[in-house]
Amino acid sequence: MGRLGNGAVSLSFCATQCDFFNQKWTTFSASVANRARAPYIKQCRRSDPALTDCLKEALQHLRPYLSSGIPEIKLPSVEPFVMDQLSLQLTGGPQGYRINLKNMEVFGASNFTVRSIKLADGSKPFETRLTIPRLTIHAKYTSSGVLIIIPASGAGDFDAVFDGVTADVKGLVSTNEKPTGTHLRVEKLDLNLSIKKPRLSVSKIFNNNRILTEATNLFLKENGHEVLRALQPQLQKKLSAEFTGIANQLLDNVPIRFFIVD
């Protein structure tokens, strides 16, 4: 009976002490997790009356890390974005002027300012507006067809400078559970670009034929907004896919609790 009594005391002591140590370990683990929070994460509190402003600051805080890349989560630098190709038909008819852009590099996307943000609400998407002072694009260029009255088939370099860019972003997110906790995932992202001043040019084309190069650049200069309208749907679609991939690479590695705490 003595041993049974001692066992009961031991079990009672363990139940009390184990519960105590479990609570301490939970607190310790949370503390370690918070201390281990990655430097590229700025944490916000859900109860903060200025939560929206905090989230804007958290996005701004990410900018230098997006620019340089985050090796520990295998997130490459967004400077530049690299896209495969775009194809544009700029004039009509069987001999219409057509250009193809390949090996596109987009610079300046990490230099954004968050102007507004609206959190998702039920089935409604989240919304944010970003401004970027300048995006530049460099690509390899091929063309075919007739430009005005000049045969304009050739290959060379294409450059674009977009000043005064506004990006309106809408997206739907879901949650999924992992051993590390609850994670967000971007399921759909729509991007709409507004560009105040486009400047487009080509070089090293038509075997450096000066007349053809000048004629093409004159066309691009005088019709910059029309060319941009033709380019924009494909550009927005490809940038949306790139942004979705980058967002999900980050979200897949960082649980919600590191972004927002209660």
Image (spheres, rainbow, N blue to C red):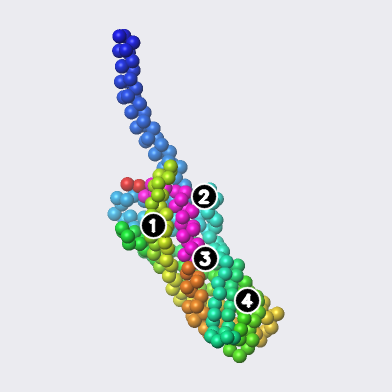
Total number of numbered labels?
4
Query: Mark 3 packing: few (<14 Cα in 10 Å), some, or many (20+)?
Result: some
Quick check: can you spot residue 163? no
Query: Mark 1 packing: few (<14 Cα in 10 Å), some, or many (20+)?
Result: some
State the CA–CA distance, disc 2 to disc 1: 20 Å
State the CA–CA distance, disc 3 to disc 1: 26 Å
State the CA–CA distance, disc 3 to disc 2: 22 Å
Q: Nearer the viewer, mark 3 or mark 2?
A: 2
Quick check: can you spot residue 176? yes
Question: Which residue matches tag 3?
Answer: 108
Question: Which residue matches tag 4?
Answer: 142
Residue 216 position, x and y percent, is: 60, 83
Are the residues at dot 3 and dot 4 in contact (C-beta closer than 8 Å)? no
Question: Which residue matches tag 1?
Answer: 173
The residue under the point 30% across, 9% down is 1
Are the residues at dot 4 and dot 1 in contact (C-beta closer than 8 Å)? no
Q: Earlier in the sequence, mark 4 or mark 2?
A: 2
The image quadrant that residue 186 belongs to is: bottom left
Span highlighted in magenta in the image: 238-260
State the CA–CA distance, disc 3 to disc 4: 24 Å
**Numbered mark located on residue 127 in the image:** none
Q: Earlier in the sequence, mark 3 or mark 4?
A: 3
